Amino acid sequence: MPPAAAAAGRMADATRGLLLGLAGVALFSLTLPMTRMAVAGLDPLFVTFGRALGAAVLAAAWLAWRRAPLPGRAALRPLALVALGCVVGFPLLTSLALRSLPAAHGAVLTGLLPLCTALYAALRGHERPSAGFWLLSAAGAGLVAAFALVQGGGSLHRADLLVFGALALAAMGYAEGGRLARTLGGEAVICWALVLAAAPSAALLAVLGPGHLAGLAQAGAGAWLAFGYVTAFSMFIGFFFWYRGMALGGVARVGQVQLLQPFLSLGGAALLLGEPLTPVHCAFALAVVAVVALGRRARVRQ
């Protein structure tokens, strides 16, 4: 293939990757508001392991429909890390945090996730972002961190530590899954990760006992609707777009798109939970959009 054609093909893949990543981010952006709604009526541990088990049923059905081959031995470790980070770790810690943390405050902290994902990918040796990319990622992370401090009255909530832990685990799952998606396929990555986590999730649900499950019948329709969303979209369908996008465009670059997620989540929190959306929100959103646009042009070597 001529060099010009190869370069054009790489650019087309990068653009498709960004668009798919943006679709995934749009679906993920309602995760925190919906989780906040769910844990208002349901136990956080049930929300975590119940949605993992429900999504695993969907994943098993998809794998059977596609007659997907079993993953190779080399894929088991990355899949386990995806399951730990995205299926269990992030949902568990955010569910616990959102019992006391406003969804809007938790949402802005997720702006640190692209930087965490790129850092994990770099430490694992998967990608080599340029200095310009790191500067832009740091600028975007600084913007959302400043936003969190402004919204928190100059201090962080106690539950922020849970959110930071959730971000670290999600970054691991995103980076490992994005890299594995290049060979296994984005849909297969999240499906096999969910299937791997199914047995532990079912066991933990069984161990929870009546104390954690007694309130299920009293939960309102809103809590169950939110639980259905985080099961079907946050835990399953969103990853189809997200991992495919990272496979095409690269973990670090497509991860930049997630800088938009806090502000999409703020809109969701305002619509679903009545949390305020002020001009300050819009100003920070415009600044982050500018950083993402510049980061699109920064060089990332595979």
Image: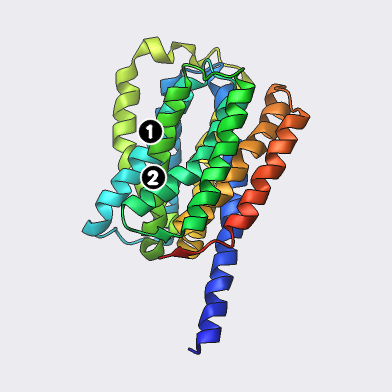
Tell me the number on the disc at residue 268: none
Tell me the number on the disc at residue 173: 2
In the image, residue 168 lies at what x, y percent?
39, 37
Q: Amino acid at mark 1?
A: Gly
Q: Residues within 10 Å of mark 1 (few under 14, many from 20)?
A: many
Work out whether 95 lies above or below 301: above
Image quarter (top left, top right, bottom left or bottom right) of the C terminus: bottom left
**Residue under pointer 1:** 89
Q: Which of marks 2 and 1 precedes in the sequence? A: 1
Count the marks.
Answer: 2
Work out whether 251 lies above or below 266: below
Q: Quadrant of residue 211?
A: top left
Q: Residues within 10 Å of mark 2 (few under 14, many from 20)?
A: many
Residue at the spot x=49%, y=59% of the render?
A: 244
Work out whether 298 lies above or below 53: below
Residue at the spot x=40%, y=64% of the render?
A: 182
In the image, residue 298 lies at what x, y percent?
54, 61
Q: Which sits in the foreground, 170 or 144?
A: 144
